[in-house]
Amino acid sequence: VYFCDPQHPWQRGSNENTNGLLRQYFPKGMSVANYSQAKLNAIARKLNERPRKTLNYQTPAERFAQSVALTG
């Protein structure tokens, strides 16, 4: 667990990047209650299948699958 200082968003870069990606689908101030579960699932799938530089250009889904395979 990492606790960053209040009002220092640069200390939590991955979180801020994810917030930016989510804002592509959910404009600020809009409730996710306006979306169906199917639409939310589709957005989550798109984000989890998007390659990330911080993961060596693997997708979060690929990295998750690898870590699950290591524990199984």
Image: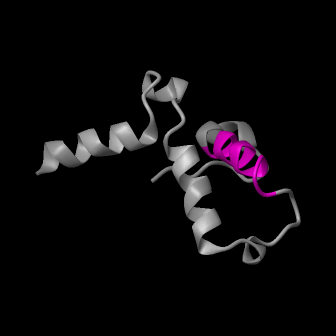
Residue 57: % across, % down: 47, 23
Residue 27: % across, % down: 85, 56
Residue at image position (62%, 48%) is 4
Please indicate whether residue 53 sits to the left or right of residue 19 in the image.
left
Please tell me whether residue 25 belongs to the stretch shown in magenta. Answer: yes
> Magenta segment range?
15-26
Residue 10: % across, % down: 71, 36
Residue at image position (73%, 53%) is 6
Prevalent SS, magenta region: helix
Specify the color scheme: one colour
Residue extending farthest left: 72
Please tell me whether residue 20 belongs to the stretch shown in magenta. Answer: yes
Please indicate whether residue 1 sits to the left or right of residue 22 in the image.
left
Which image quadrant is residue 60 in?
A: top left
Disc tally is 0
Residue extending farthest right: 29
Residue at image position (64%, 37%) is 13
**Front in this rendered view, residue 7 or 38:** 38
Q: Vertical placement of 4 versus 10: above or below?
A: below
Residue 69: % across, % down: 17, 44
Residue extending farthest bottom: 33
Please indicate whether residue 30 sits to the left or right of residue 58 in the image.
right
Please indicate whether residue 65 sits to the left or right of residue 56 in the image.
left
**Front in this rendered view, residue 54 or 63:** 63
Q: Vertical placement of 53 versus 72: above or below?
A: above
**Front in this rendered view, residue 15 or 27:** 27
Which image quadrant is residue 36 in?
A: bottom right
